Structure formats: C-alpha cells, structure tokens
C-alpha cells in the first residue's frame, strides 16, 4: 500500500472529525468465541499467558475497538478511526493478515443520521480511489427478523433461523430440514405417543428421577403436538428462499419488498426508514438492495443496516469497504452492556 493512498483516507476521516485511536493486538479469546462460536476457534492464533488466560491475535478490528470503548467507561457519543492488521488462519496466505482502516460511531443519539454519515464517508473514500466502476449494496437484517416472526413455525425454528442466518451452508441445511420436517423423527414421535397415552392413565403425582408424571406428560405433549402441518414447513422454507433472492435497484426496494410480503399474506409494511441513503444518480456507481448481503462473511453481529462497496477490476468485483450497525454486539455476544454503534472497514489491499 502506497503511503499517498493511505494518507488520502486518513485525511478524509480527520476532515469528518473522526478521532484516531490505538487498538490492542491481543484480546481475550472468550470475547471472540462468545460472538462467533467455538467453531471459529480454528481460525484464531491463540496462546495462554502466565496466568493461564487464553488470548488471541485479533481476528478483526471491530471487536478490539468495542472493548476499548467499554473499558474507557464512556457513555458519550464518540467518532473514532484506527488502522492495523487482523489475523486469521487460512489456506490462502494472502488472507492470513488483512490490513484495514476502520471507523466507528459509538452511542448514537440519532441512528439514521449516523448510518448516513458512515455510508457517505465510505462513498467519499471510494471517490478518492482510482476506480471508475463500482457498486454499493445495502441490506437490513431487521427485514429478515420481521419475516421470520410472521411465519407459522415453532419458536425453536425461528430462533434457529435467526441465529444461523449468516452461516450460508448450515442455513441451507436448516431449510431442507424445515421443508421436510426432518427434525421430527416419526419413530420417536410414535414411541412418545405410546408412552404418553400410557402415562396419562397413571397417578400424575408419581415421581421418576426427580420429575413428576405431570411434568413429563407436558413435555410429551409439546413433542407430539408440533404446530406445523406437513405443508407448513415446506411453504415457510419456500418463502424464505424467495425472500433471500430479492435484489433490485435501491430506489425500488420498498415497493419490491411490499409486493413480496403482500403476495405471501404477511402483514409487513416496509418504509423508507429502512434505507438511510437514497439512490443517487452517479456515473459509474450502481446503488442496489439485496436481502442476502453479508451472508457467509461471518458478520453475525450486525443488527440492522448492512452495506458493501465493491469495485470492479479485471472484470471482477472486489470488496473495498463493508460495514453496518451492530447495536447488539456488546450485549448479545460479549455479555456486556448494550451500546448503539455503526461502523465500516476499508480493505487496504483493494484500495488503489
């Protein structure tokens, strides 16, 4: 990376009143695993300190920035940027060390305005590059949440689908199970029914292994009376698959989404509030909306806005900047207090 290009980005961020901060290269492994799960451990460069505490080289810079903000015990709005490398194990040597410049706004008072600022700053960085053919794709995880909440499937299925939305491969397996009712083993259900009808004739106060017949019967009732009819799972899976195929010009997104929800008898109304920026008519920059943006990229901490700026070189698109809002990262994944936050990262390897 040429220092001239680096300085271009730094100057843009300083002009926007983002404050430069230093981040720790090493963080506690538990914070990473709470966010990404135990399976993510295979990507970490980990070791133990003299106190037996497991530490890791940071796999991304966002989590280090969030921990710093919390440790400073600040509740005030703060606009920061930072530079550095993220480290992940990979078969591709180029992906082991990724250099980034990141920016974040913590403790947003007006989330829509701060979302706009992050996107507009990202577009300014794009403009400072040499690329003449690019696109910005926007999505919003809350739309998927609204969809799942309206489907006639058990709560346990809603929780599964929301949790594994970002994991494309496993999510596809879940949909196959949903449409075929594979989580309901007919042999097990038949056995449960037999035991259920036998137990309801017994003394309900009788106790087995610390549990009363009454409690066990309630459990059997839930297992054998699954609220799905044979066609319900198949119908829900089809709706989800079709939803994740939606891609259109950003200006058409509310209309396209509302037509989709109406067609599937789902009482959801999408307003322009889901989209912090408008489709601006710019030469060589395409604005699009996608319901599947971010999936497969391990960005499971995003809670609403998600965006990606990609640039074209050698007839291929490469990611230059990606970001979004992560209000639940601290509370849901790190077990700390909730802090509204939005940010983005510039992939310096693709900045020219």
Image (tube, rainbow, N blue to C red):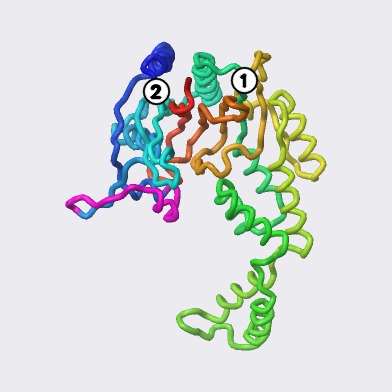
Q: Earlier in the sequence, mark 1 or mark 2?
A: 2
Q: Is residue 69 magenta?
A: no
Provide residue 304's location: percent of width, then percent of height: 56, 35
- Give x and y (percent) for residue 333: 43, 46
**Alpha carbon distance from label 1 to label 2:** 21 Å
Q: Is residue 33 above or below residue 251?
A: below
Along the line of sight, which residue is nearer the eye, 64 or 322?
Answer: 322
Give the quadrant of residue 67: top left
Which segment did they paint magenta?
A: 35-51
Residue situated furthest right in the rendering: 263
* Residue at position x 71%, y 51% in the image: 151
Q: Name the residue that disc number 1 marks.
A: 133
Q: Position of residue 214 (x, y in %)?
A: 57, 78
Q: Residue at x 52, y 80 (%)?
A: 212
Q: Secondary structure at mark 2?
A: loop
Task: Name the residue furthest front.
Answer: 314
How packed mark 1 is, by other alpha carbons closer than 10 Å (few <14, some 14-19, many 20 or more), is: some
Q: Which residue is mark 2?
A: 1
Up/down of 106 relative to 192, above or below? above
226 sits to left or right of 213: right
Quadrant hosting residue 27: top left
Residue at 77%, 65% in the rendered image: 230
Instruction: Give the residue at x 36% y 33%.
Output: 85
């Amino acid at each position: 990376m040429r220092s001239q290009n680096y300085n271009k980005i730094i100057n843009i961020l300083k002009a926007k009143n983002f404050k430069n901060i230093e981040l720790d290269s090493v963080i506690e492994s538990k914070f990473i695993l709470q966010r990404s799960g135990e399976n993510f451990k295979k990507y970490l460069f980990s070791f133990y300190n003299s106190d037996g505490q497991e530490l890791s080289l940071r796999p991304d810079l966002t989590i280090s920035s969030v921990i710093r903000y919390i440790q400073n015990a600040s509740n005030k709005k703060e606009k920061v940027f930072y530079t550095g490398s993220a480290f992940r194990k990979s078969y591709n040597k180029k992906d082991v060390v990724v250099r980034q410049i990141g920016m974040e706004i913590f403790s947003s008072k007006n989330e829509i305005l701060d979302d706009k600022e992050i996107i507009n700053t990202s577009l300014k960085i794009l403009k400072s590059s040499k690329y003449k053919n690019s696109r910005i794709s926007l999505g919003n995880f809350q739309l998927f949440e609204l969809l799942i909440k309206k489907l006639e499937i058990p709560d346990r299925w809603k929780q599964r689908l929301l949790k594994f939305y970002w994991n494309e491969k496993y999510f596809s397996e879940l949909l196959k199970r949903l449409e075929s009712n594979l989580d309901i083993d007919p042999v097990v259900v038949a056995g449960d029914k037999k035991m259920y009808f036998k137990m309801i004739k017994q003394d309900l106060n009788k106790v087995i292994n610390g549990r009363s017949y009454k409690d066990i019967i309630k459990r059997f009732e839930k297992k054998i009376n699954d609220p799905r009819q044979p066609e319900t799972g198949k119908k829900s899976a089809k709706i989800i698959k079709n939803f994740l195929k939606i891609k259109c010009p950003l200006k058409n997104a509310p209309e396209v989404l509302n037509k989709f929800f109406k067609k599937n008898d789902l009482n959801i109304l999408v307003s322009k509030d889901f989209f912090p920026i408008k489709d601006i008519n710019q030469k060589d920059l395409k604005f699009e909306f996608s319901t599947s943006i971010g999936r497969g990229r391990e960005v499971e901490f995003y809670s609403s806005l998600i965006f990606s700026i990609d640039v074209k070189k050698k007839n291929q698109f490469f990611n230059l900047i990606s970001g979004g809002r992560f209000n639940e990262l601290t509370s849901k994944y790190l077990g700390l207090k909730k802090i509204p936050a939005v940010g983005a990262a510039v992939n310096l390897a693709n900045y020219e």
